[in-house]
Amino acid sequence: GGVHLAALEREGILRSADGGASWTPAGMPQDTLSPIVSDIAFDRSVSDRAFALVEQRGLLGSTDGGATWMPVGTPDPRGPVAAGRLLAVHARTKGWMLGATESGTIVRTTDGGTRGSPVRKGEGAAAVLSLAADPTNPDVVYAGTESGALISTDFGVVWRSLSPALPGLASVVAAAREPTGTAVYVFGEGVGMQRWMDGSPIPERVDTDLGGSTVPAIATSRDGRDLYCIVTTTVHRY
């Protein structure tokens, strides 16, 4: 159950209030035509607040669980976070966000996106494919890159590789809340879906059937308890 949000290419944001059983279009700004939504992130610190990155519009925010959306922060779509294609929101401190660009740069802002500074420069670095905030520790965030998964324990200031615990290949990541702590789910083409707990020497294979598939995204529900994996036009729930 609960609110779920999904983005369709040039169709904007869809919202479900019944756990995905039915969907309705969200209200977008009137001058937003054929929106290309690159990422959506819930703010776990504030009930019903969420953010979305939209090409040519920048950062949008919602205070009603994704039913309606309006511009937030800088109106400039080239702003420090607004220019990104991936988004992570700190679950405790208002205004703290991370944005990742196509070049691999990760920008950190502490004022809701008006100003920001690069904490990882894309020049010569592997492109970032996904960002995932830890559902149990607001300072921990994960990044899936073209050369493997990264972790930061200070909300993006410093990053380190999770190799060799996780494969050093192109990966998308998600962080899920489990009874024993946070589980990091990683999909790498050719190895399928893998699950890794901090401190484990090697990951556990979850779904080898996805090994030859193209998985553009994996994500968790707002509370971090449900995991979703997109395979072409199908959504799998774990």
Image: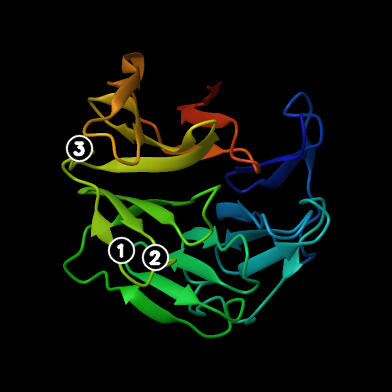
Q: Nearer the viewer, mark 2 or mark 3?
A: 3
Q: Position of residue 37 (x, y in %)?
A: 58, 54
Q: Is residue 25 shown left or right of residue 176?
A: right
Other-residue count near label 1 (Cα within 10 Å), few / some / many at <14 / 14–19 / ≥20: many
Query: Which label belongs to residue 131?
Result: none
Label 3 vs 1, first from the N-terminus: 1
Residue that sits furthest to the top in the current view: 209
x then y, percent, for residue 158:
31, 69
Q: Is 1 placed above or below 122 here? A: above
Amino acid beneath label 2: Thr
Question: Circle 3 sits in a helix, a strand or a loop, which is it?
Answer: loop
Name the residue tied to disc 3: 167
Residue bearing mark 1: 104
Residue marked by disc 2:
101
Q: Residue at x 41, y 38 (%)?
A: 216
Residue situated in front as seen by the camera: 94 or 40: 94
